[in-house]
Image (cartoon, grey):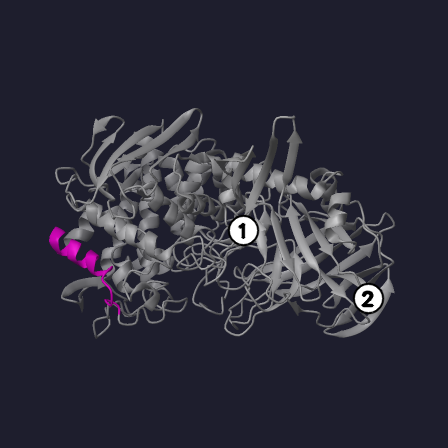
Amino acid sequence: MKRTSSHDGTGIYLTIFLMVMSGLSFLVCAVLYNYGVTVVLARPADYVRPFMGSEGGGNMFPGVTRPFGSVKMGIDLATYGGSGDPYSGYLPAGNVTGFSMMHESGTGGAPKYGVVSQLPIVGTVTNPLLKYDLPRADGAKDEAMVGYYKANLSNNVQVEMSASRHAGIMRHTFPQSGEEKNILVDVSHFLPSNRGLGIEQHYVGGAINLREDGRYTGYGIYNGGWNMGVNWKIHFCGEFDVNPSKAVTFIGTGETLEDIGKNSTEAMTKRVGALFTFQGGNGTISSRIRRRQQAGLLVESKIGVSWMSEEKACEFIDEEIPEEDAFNTLINETKDAWEEELLTKISTTETDTNKLSLLYSTIYGMFIIPSDRTGENPGWESDEPYYDDIFTLWDCYRSHTPLFHILSPSRYSDFIRSMIDIWRHDGWLPDGRSSNFNGRIQGGTNADNVLADAFVKGVPSIDWDDAWSAVLNDAENEPPNNNDPQAPDSSTKEGRGAISDWKAYGHITTKFSRSVSRASEYSSNDFAIAQLAKGLNKPAAIYEKYVNRSHNWENHWDNRSTVYGFSGFLSPITPSHSFPASAWDPLDCSGCYWDNPYYQGMPYEYSFNAHHDMSRLIKRMGGDTTFIARLSKMFEPNSNPNGDTRFGKTIFNPGNEPSFASPYLFNFVPGNQWRSVAASRHIARSYYSTAANGLPGNSDAGAMQSWLLWSMLGLYPITGTTTFLIASPQLADFAIDLGGGKTFSVTTTGGNEEAGEWFVQSLRVNGEAWNKSWVEWADVFENGGTMEYVLGAEKTQWDADGERPLWEII
C-alpha cells in the first residue's frame, strides 16, 4: 500500500491505492479532495491476477517474472493428498520446501526447474540435510501482483520476492525471538514428480563457495523433467544485506551429514549447500520498512542466475538490481516492463472491471514463457536471438503463436530466428524445448506450421532459405529414437518419428503410438510446407508433392465408423495396413495419451481437424447439412458418456487443444456464423474466469489464455494461412497497436453481454459492408484496419450470401 499526501492550505490531497487481495493488486485509485471522491481507473498491470489458473489443473506460475524473463521467482511446495505435482512450484496447500529462482508456467507431464533456492528456518540447525518443509501460517494465503509475491510461513517468517530479467531479491522477515534465524541454500533442491512416468527431474551434483567479499557462488547440475532433458548446469551468485553471524557449507548423502563447516564444497551425486545464521539488526532497509517490521529481523538477499558462469550471475546482480530502494524499484520496473512490452498493446474504453481483469490477466499469462535467453546459451556462440522453455508448439501453434506475432512482432521475429538457429546447431527444429534441449514432441512437427504462418504473414528478418531446409528435414528424415518410456516406438525428442510409414504408405499404422493424431498433424504439417514451397517459388513438383501428402488424412477415414447416425471418422490402421476388423468407436480414444492411437482428443474431435482441407472434409462428412449437424453434436450436453462432468459431458473438450478451432468451424458453411458465436461465447463464459481455478485445463504455456483472448477479440486464426474466422467481440471496443503507427480497431453497437445480445447483425470492415465470415491478414493486420459490429439478440444469417473461407486453397 502506497500513501502520499500534501498540504497547500486549501485542502488535503490524499492518494490511496486500494488493494484487493487474493492475488489481485491495486484496482482503483481514489483521489479525495475536500471530502469529494473521484475514481480513476488503474494502470493495466494493476488488473492482472497472477493466481488465475494456478489451481484446478491450470498449473499457472503466480510468482514474479518479467515478460519472457529468464528468472521466474516463486514458492515451491510438496505434493499433498490428491494435489498432483507442483508443476509451477505453487500449490494452494501443503508444505513449503523453498523459494527458488527458476520455474515454468502452465506445463504438464512432470515439473521442471525449482532450482537455486532459499528456505528460512527458525531455531538451531545441526543437520541442514534434514527435511525442514513447513506449512504456511494458519489461515494465510499468498499474495501476488505483477512484480511482487508474498508468503507467510508457520514459523512466522514472511518471504517477499521481486525480480529483474536474470536476478531478483528475496526478503525474509523473521519474528522477534531469541532463536537462531537461518537461511538454507540447498543446491540439491528441485521440483520433484510423484507420477512415476520416468520423466521426473534428478539432482546430479553441484558446488557452493563462500567468498571473501560476502557473496556465495556455485552451480547445480540436474536432468529430466517434462522434456527428458540431459544434464544441464545452472550457475548462481547470492549475497545478503545483513552479515551472517555464521556461514558454513555442508555435504552429505540423503539426510546423512558427512561434513559441515568449510568455505566451499563440490561433489557429484552428493548433496551440497550452505547455511547462513543471523542474530540481529536489519540491513539496508529504510526506516519506514523497519517500523513496519516492528524490529523483527529483515534479511534481504540478492540472487543472480546464469547458464554461462558464476561471474555472469554476479554481474546480473550488479547490472540489474539498483543499490537504493532495490526491492520497490524492481517491482515498479517489472510493472513498467509488462506494460511497455505487452499489456498496453490492447487498449479499450471498456469499464467492466471483470472484463479488464480477464483481458490483462490473459495477456500476462500468455508470455511468462518462453524464456528469452539471448546471450545465455551455453550450447553455441551465435549472433542470433535465443529462446528456451518452449512448452510446446503442439499446444501453442493453433492460437498462441498467431497472437504472439500480433502483440509482440519484434520479439516474434526473434523467436522465429531462434528456432531456425536451433535447427542450425542441434539439427532439428524444436516442438518443445527446455534447459537447452529439444523435447518432447507430441504429434507432428508443428514448427513447420509456425514457420509457414510467419511466412504468409510477412514476418521480417527471417532467413527463409534456412527455414525451408529446416522444414524439409522434418518432412523427409527420420529422427533417432530417444527411447521415451511412455512411447518407445519412435522419437519424442524432435522430428516425425513415424515418417517412415507416412512416406511409404501415406498413412501411419498402429506400430507407432499416437498413429491417428500424428497422421492428422502430419497432414497439416505438409500443407504448411506446401505453403512455403509455393511462396518461395520452389519447383511445381515439390509443391504438388506436399499438397498431395496434406490430403493423406483421408487415408485414415473409415466410413464404417459410426455414432449418432453419423458415419465416417478417422480410424487407426493396423500394421497389416487395414482398418480394424471391428469399426472403431468415434468416442473412444483408448486412453488419449502417449501410447494410444489418439493423443488428448477423441476420434470425433480429430475428424474435424483438416482445417486446410475443409472442402474435402465437408464432402466426406456428407455435405453442409450433415457437417453442421455433426459439429453441433460436439457441443451437446451428455453427448460423450465418459466425458468430463465439468463440461457437461460434451464431446468438445475445452481443456485440451485438439478441438480449439471447432467452435468456429460453423463459419465454413454460409449462414451459420451465428452458431460459431453461440458456441465460442458459451465456452468463454462458462469455463474461464480470473479465479485460481479459472482455466478449463493446463494453461500449456498460455495456450488456454490465447484461446480466451481470441474469443474476447471476436476472431480465430487458422495457422499457416492468412485467414481469421469471425465471431463477435466480448469487449465493447478495443484497439491493438500493431507497431509502425498501424492500428487494428474494433467497435460494437447494440450489444448487451449479460442479455445474450452478442450475435452479429451486420458488419463493416474498413468502412465497407461485409458479408464474409472471415477476414484476411491484409484486411485488418498487415496495415491496420477497422471492424464495426452491430450486435443483437437475433441469430441472423448476415453471412449467407458470402463465400467460404479457405475453400479449395489446395
Quarter assignment of residue 807: top left
Picture quarter with the C terminus? top left
Say if 22 sits above or below 587 in the image. above
Query: What is the spatial separation of the Cα atoms under label 2 and label 1, in whole angstroms?
Result: 41 Å
Residue under circle 1?
389
Q: Position of residue 37 (x, y in %)?
A: 50, 36
Above or below residue 109? Residue 464 is: above
Type of the residue with mark 2: Glu
Identify the residue position indicated by label 2 in the image.
179
> For the point 80% across and 73% down, which residue is it?
257
Give residue 579's position: percent from left, percent from top.
23, 69
Residue 78 seen from this side:
yes
Point out the tag, 2 or 1, that comes first from the N-terminus.
Answer: 2
Q: Nearer the viewer, mark 2 or mark 1?
A: 2
Category of crowding for the residue at label 1, using alpha-carbon neighbours closer than 10 angstroms: few (below 14), some (14–19), many (at least 20) = many
Secondary-structure class at tag 2: loop
* Residue 670 painted magenta: no
Q: Which residues are magenta?
A: 621-640
